[in-house]
Image (cartoon, rainbow, N blue to C red):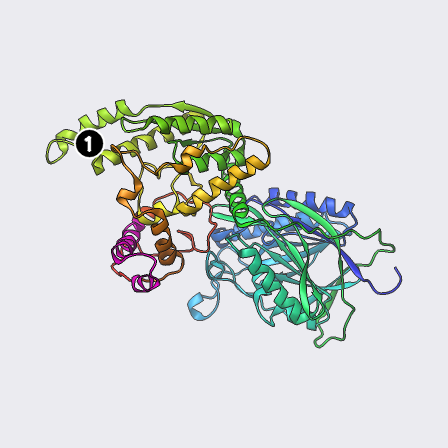
Amino acid sequence: MNGPVTHLRVAICQINPTVGDLDGNAALALTALSDAEDAGADVAIMPEMMITGYPPEDLVLKPGFVADCRAALEKFAAQTRRCAVVIGFADGDSEPGRELPDVAGGEFANGVWNALAVCAQGRVFGTYHKRHLPNYDVFDELRHFRPGNEALVLYEVAGVPVGMTLCEDSWISHGPVSQLAAGGARLVINVNGSPFREGKQAVREKVIADRVRETGIPVVYTNLVGGQDELVFDGASFVTAPRGDGAEVVARCGAFRETVEIFDVELPPARPTIDRYRTITVSSAPASRPSRIPAPMVPELDPLAERWEALVLGTRDYVHKSGFSQICLGMSGGVDSSLVAAIATDALGPANVHGVLMPSRYSSDHSIADADALAANLGIDTMTVPIEPAHVAFTEMLVPHVADGRIDVGDLTDQNVQSRIRGVLLMALANEHGWLVLTTGNKSEAAVGYSTLYGDTAGAYAVIKDVWKLVVYDLCRWRNEVARAEGVTPPIPESVLVKAPSAELRPGQRDDESLPPYDVLDPILVAYVEDDHNVAEILAMDIADRNDVERVCRLVDIAEYKRRQTPLGARITAKAFGRDRRIPVVNRYRG
């Protein structure tokens, strides 16, 4: 090739690994690499911790796991060819029986790094250890890794000096990205395991734009995709390049789906270097370059579409990666179970979703009719198991052992007995058929404890655990609009969306008799749970009266013990219960 290289052909490999499946993850990477090789890519970029899956959590405290991870990397590297590969893995010097410095002594107890490797031609050319370890939100990396501190290295890929960074390194102003540019990099690759939350993509693109403005060179941001426990990774990888005095996103991959996108990235001219770093030559520039491949520019999803896709992907991956293919859920004809059924159907296909109707003496005719209509619209099967015989039997068993010799119809004990009977039935059906149980409670209910332990909270995965009640309605309406646009029957009956919410555990029950209306409740909860305001600050916002604010915040506090015993579910907000919000169960502080 004559003259300086002006473009680099990159393959963004947006892949969905599974934590702990070292050989399976390496095989996924090899399949993506084959696509990259076939298209003449110069470099294939895999996500953070691709070999291990992310986050590996305390698996990296096991020296055997880290050794196996390195072995899997070496096997992967042995199968590489001309195309350079950047791939994430756990690197370590831990050995069984070896004593390592203690954290309290100012060092890191674990001799493991969050690392990437640069591979080609059947070997590993070098590694980079993540320098900046996030320890906020859902991240606990200071528990699991030590920061890298080696001298920075540039890798010459197809004649182009390229810098390598890992996730948080790109968030540091005048940090590793700028340092690599000062050393002569014409492109920086940043590999990520960045989980989804509402509004996260805009934050990512702003951060990378800041780095591009600092350096004047493009940054390729490659992100993981898939569900892992409560985290959902959305992919949405992109490239940001300098434009005039600013920065512009010049490529964007689709969100919430695996893809290998191969295209040419325009490079800025080489500039005099401020610093000088060691350069490792990985591959030479090809003698000729096929016609240029334009970059993808997939439109961003609107906020409700993002949430829907996150819930669908999180559900699908939790079920499948747990070794299941089919699920069941209780269907009451209410809006929450309707939403969960629709998400599960999109995630798993209608043949793999089983609705269970469990009417009681208090169930309304319209609830049964609404559940049947929903099932018909979704194309899922249902079975009906009335709980009256068990309800009568439980009541008769308990009556001799209660203080006044009776259980009043519709009192709290009676309500919880019904809910727990339903939980037992769902778990029994799951055992019998090899299904996994999805629960149907939303974030508003979880916040104030409007649920029954070992009843409606019994199950393996809480699909809408991080979805406020008002957003439940928004998502249902959005999904119906999508169906109308596609010319098919909207899945969620309109009657479900207009009737008053009710648990139907006593005669004429309505949610707004036990709680403030949701248009009052949810703003209080968002302020208290997600924004960490105290009672006085919420009162100053003038969003609800004193009685409602004080009562709701008190309910949130005393329900912590319930939340600790409920299934995990997909995280989609900036502060979900569990990884994000960690409040003591025994707690007398009242803010």
Q: Image check: 565 left or right of 133?
A: left
- Is 92 in front, or is 156? 156
Q: Is residue 439 visible?
A: no
Q: Image check: 2 left or right of 76?
A: right
Mark 1 is surrounded, within 10 Å at the Cα level, by few (under 14), some (14 to 19) or many (20 or more) other residues, namely few
**Residue 492: x and y, percent?**
47, 34
Q: Main secondary structure of the magenta part?
A: helix
| Quadrant of the image occupied by residue 26 | top right
Q: Is residue 293 visible?
A: yes
Q: Is residue 354 above or below residue 38?
A: above
Q: Which residues are magenta?
A: 535-561
Q: Give the total number of marks visible in the rendering.
A: 1
**Residue 347: x and y, percent?**
53, 36
Mark 1 lies on residue: 409
**Residue 35: x and y, percent?**
73, 44
- Is 340 in front, or is 524? 524
**Residue 345: x and y, percent?**
51, 33
